[in-house]
Structures are given as structure tokens and as C-alpha cells.
Image (spheres, helix red, strand yellow):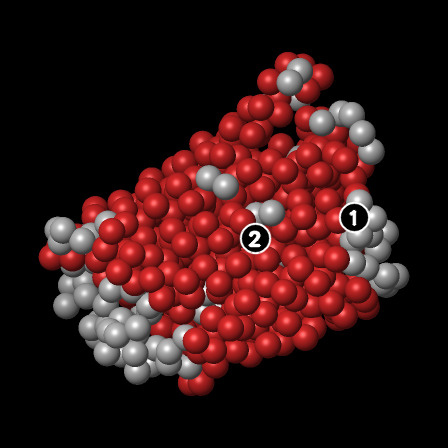
């Protein structure tokens, strides 16, 4: 078996003698994932500081609503990215797709870092901000499906849940890194300095980190075989439509899972500041610790899925999310202590770990090699744009209309949809394309 040192094909599920090089493949793939999500989440976490620079009119909620709208717009580029990069990954290789996506994220982040404000160039400022976010949205739309596919394919048979969980380790790590950098900068700069120019530092760091990720990804082996890439069905939407049941399950899993995930991660900081009226620095520090614990838990829950099966993990997530969403968000909206907020957020994140730890592999197991990256990435991107990317915007819209409590019920309803799909899902240990019979 060829070692993970050059871009040559390796077959999924085949034992690799050098375990360290297999781990390097996971690290190399996930490094770019970390950078991509650091750049993407930096926007959300710094919005409290730059919202007024690009949208000077209105109160704090209106300004956040405008920046959240652009955050959501970036998500609506994801379906295009999921299709484009899924096609590239299935037709030209996972490695090529991952290298292009990290370069695009670097370009978008660098543009935001040097972008003039509304006071300097007027309405061109928010327009250029939107353009940069669209570039980043296209990049992330392609990153998720390709990285999930690659990490699932190179993982050891019987331990795919454990290895694939590192996609969300680095995804959460990207959020955590963005928060850590922000918290560090908050210690040295005043609020006025952060609003004036300090927020730009985070985007500069992201652009530079992308170059490191690109270097690591250049050495990755290709996990798709030459025969699969040269197949007439490779990357074809027509071939993908032959797997309608799998497509519907991915759409439902992503709708409920992404909405829940973004509610308890990116939106939570704003929710605690804007609704519970916690201090911004205290909320940032608390979320940093919560995300650190959340990140460490991913391999634990991934290993659990290897034992109990992906279907049972999804039923645990969706059932618990359905029951807990309303009381948890209600309690967090009235919390007065950062310690109490931490406890409640961790309850939500523990529930979410049943999904996030297997979010990639549970979808990869549903599709054959020729359309796997497209099958994972495209329906994920569609549902993520509709339900994940819009989470902040919908939540803030409910708040602006005086019906903030409705948002929690919205989260619960989408968890119920995902629960139905989880019950419908087969046991992929026996009927899945990576380890089972290949019949879904």
C-alpha cells in the first residue's frame, strides 16, 4: 500500500501499514478545515465591533441584523460551492478540491482585512463586504463535503467515527481559535480601538494561516481511485439523483443539525449579550471554554458511534434536541451569571455532540465513491444555507418583532424533522457504502 507521502491513490477501507502517516493525512486535511472555519467564524465573532463601521444607521440590534444578513448570504453561496467542489473532488480528486477551497478562503479573508469602511467609501463598503463573504461562502461550501469525504475514506475500518470526528474538532477549533484571538486582543485593546481597527487583526491572521494549510495539503495522498474519477458517473448530478433516499436524509440531518449547531455556537455569544445582557468579554470568555470542552468531546462521541452505530447516535441527538431546545434557550435568555450560562450551554453542546462528531461520516456512508463528495457536500450546502446560515438572521428577526421565544420552537421543529430521518436511516454498519453492503 502506498504511504501517505505523495498524491497517489489509496483505496478506502484498506489497511495502511504506517499508522502515523494515516494520522498525518487526517491532520493535513483537517488543518485546512480549521483555517477555513477560523476565517468564516471570525466574521461572526467580530461583528459586535465592526457592524457600525459598515452599517452606521440604526440601533445595535439593527446593525447586527444587517451583518447577520451578510453572514447568511455567504451561506447561500454554499450550494454552488458544494456542487462545484463536489464535482472537482469526484472528477479530479479530493486533494485538488481541498487546495482550491483553502486558497479562496484566504482571498476572502484578506479582502475583509483591508476593506475601507462606510465612512471612507460609502455604500461600496457593505457591497464589498458582501462580495468577500460570497467568496468565503463558495469556499466553505466546497470544503465541507470534500474534507468529510476524504477523512472518512482514509480512516481505519471500524474506527471511522473516531477519525472522522476530527473534522468537527478542527471546525470547532476554528471557532475556538477565532474566540481565543479575540479574547487575547480584548486584553490589550480598548473597545474603541477594537471598533476602529483591532477587528482587522483576526482576518489578517486567517489569511496567513491559509498559506500554512495549503503547504500541508500539497503533500496529501489522493483517496479516490483513478477508475472512480474516470467513471462517466463521477461528479454527475444525474447519477446523484439515483440516491434520492440518501439525499433526503442528508437534507434532513443538515437542516436540524446545522440549525442546532449554529444556535449554540456562533449565535450564542450574541444571544447572551443582546438578550441576557451579559458582559461581552464575559460571554466571549465563557464561550471559549465551552467550545474547548466541546472540541475535546468530539472523538469520544465519534468512538461511541463506532460502537452503537451512526443511526443510534443520530436518534440520540435528534430526540434530545427536540425535548431540550425550548427549555434550554428559554433559560439562557434570562441567565444572569456566566457560570450558569456555561452549564446550560454545555448541556446543549453535549446533546449536539451526538451529531457533530459524525456529521461527515454519517453522510459519506450513504453514497458510492463516484458521487460521494458531491452527495455529501451539495445537499449539505443547500440545507445549511437555508437553516444553518439563516439561524442568526431568523433569531434576530424574531427578537426585532417581539417574538424571540418563537425561535426556540423553530429549532425544536427542525429537530423533529431530523428525528424522522434518523429513524428512517439504515444501520450503515450493515448497509453502507464504506463498510457495509453498499445498499442504502
Name the residue at 48% across, 81% down: 312
Give percent across and percent down for residue 311.
44, 78
Name above or below for residue 191 compared with residue 415: above
Q: From the viewer's perspective, is 286 left or right of 206?
A: right
Q: From the viewer's perspective, is 119 left or right of 103?
A: right
- Which label sits on residue 387? 2
Task: Work out how far the residue at label 2 is from the one at label 1, CA to CA, in angstroms.
Answer: 17 Å
Q: Which residue is at the front of the view, 200 or 336?
A: 336
Quarter residue 70 falls in: top right
- Quadrant for the N terminus in the image: bottom left
Name the residue at 66% across, 45% down: 393
> Can see residue 190?
no
**Sequence-wise first label, 2 or 1:** 2
Q: Secondary structure at mark 2?
A: helix
Give percent across and percent down for residue 279.
84, 50
**How many other residues sit within 10 Å of disc 1, few (<14), some (14-19) or many (≥20)?**
some
Name the residue at 42% across, 45% down: 79
Q: Which residue is mark 1?
A: 399
Q: Which residue is at the front of the view, 10 or 260?
A: 260
Name the residue at 62% across, 21% down: 125
Give percent across and percent down for residue 51.
71, 33
Name above or below for residue 49 compared with residue 351: above
> Can see residue 344?
yes
Q: From the viewer's perspective, is 305 left or right of 396?
A: left
Amino acid at each position: 500500500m502506498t504511504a501517505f507521502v505523495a498524491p497517489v491513490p489509496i483505496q478506502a477501507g484498506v489497511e495502511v501499514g504506517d499508522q502515523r502517516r494515516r494520522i498525518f493525512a487526517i491532520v493535513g486535511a483537517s488543518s485546512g478545515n480549521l483555517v477555513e472555519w477560523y476565517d468564516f467564524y471570525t466574521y461572526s465573532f467580530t461583528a459586535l465591533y465592526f457592524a457600525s463601521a459598515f452599517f452606521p444607521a440604526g440601533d445595535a440590534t439593527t446593525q447586527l441584523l444587517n451583518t447577520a444578513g451578510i453572514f447568511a448570504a455567504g451561506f447561500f453561496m454554499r450550494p454552488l460551492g458544494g456542487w462545484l467542489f463536489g464535482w472537482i473532488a469526484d472528477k479530479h480528486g479530493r486533494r485538488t478540491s481541498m487546495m482550491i477551497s483553502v486558497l479562496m478562503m484566504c482571498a476572502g479573508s484578506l479582502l475583509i482585512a483591508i476593506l475601507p469602511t462606510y465612512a471612507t467609501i460609502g455604500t461600496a463598503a457593505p457591497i464589498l463586504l458582501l462580495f468577500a463573504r460570497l467568496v468565503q461562502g463558495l469556499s466553505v461550501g466546497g470544503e465541507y463535503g470534500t474534507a468529510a469525504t476524504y477523512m472518512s475514506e482514509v480512516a481505519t475500518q471500524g474506527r471511522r467515527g473516531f477519525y472522522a470526528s476530527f473534522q468537527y474538532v478542527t471546525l470547532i477549533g476554528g471557532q475556538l481559535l477565532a474566540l481565543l484571538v479575540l479574547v487575547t486582543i480584548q486584553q490589550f485593546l480598548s473597545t474603541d480601538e477594537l471598533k476602529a481597527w483591532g477587528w482587522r487583526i483576526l482576518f489578517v491572521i486567517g489569511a496567513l494561516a491559509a498559506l500554512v494549510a495549503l503547504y500541508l495539503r500539497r503533500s496529501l495522498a489522493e483517496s479516490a481511485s483513478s477508475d472512480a474519477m474516470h467513471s462517466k458517473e463521477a461528479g454527475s448530478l444525474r447519477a446523484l439523483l439515483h440516491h434520492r433516499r440518501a439525499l433526503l436524509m442528508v437534507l434532513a440531518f443538515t437542516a436540524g443539525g446545522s440549525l442546532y449547531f449554529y444556535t449554540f455556537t456562533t449565535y450564542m455569544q450574541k444571544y447572551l449579550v443582546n438578550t441576557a445582557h451579559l458582559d461581552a468579554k464575559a460571554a466571549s470568555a465563557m464561550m471559549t471554554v465551552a467550545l474547548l470542552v466541546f472540541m475535546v468531546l468530539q472523538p469520544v462521541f465519534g468512538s461511541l458511534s463506532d460502537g452503537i452505530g451512526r443511526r443510534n447516535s443520530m436518534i440520540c441527538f435528534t430526540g434530545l434536541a427536540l425535548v431540550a431546545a425550548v427549555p434550554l434557550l428559554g433559560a439562557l435568555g434570562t441567565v444572569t451569571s456566566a457560570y450558569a450560562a456555561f452549564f446550560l450551554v454545555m448541556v446543549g453542546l453535549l446533546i449536539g455532540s451526538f451529531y457533530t462528531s459524525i456529521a461527515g461520516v454519517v453522510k459519506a456512508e450513504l453514497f458510492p465513491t463516484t458521487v460521494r463528495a458531491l452527495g455529501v457536500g451539495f445537499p449539505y450546502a443547500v440545507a445549511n444555507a437555508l437553516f444553518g446560515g439563516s439561524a442568526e438572521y431568523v433569531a434576530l428577526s424574531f427578537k426585532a418583532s417581539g417574538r424571540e421565544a418563537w425561535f426556540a420552537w423553530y429549532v425544536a421543529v427542525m429537530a423533529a424533522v431530523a428525528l424522522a430521518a434518523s429513524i428512517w436511516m439504515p444501520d450503515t454498519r450493515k448497509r453502507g457504502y464504506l463498510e457495509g453492503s453498499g445498499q442504502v
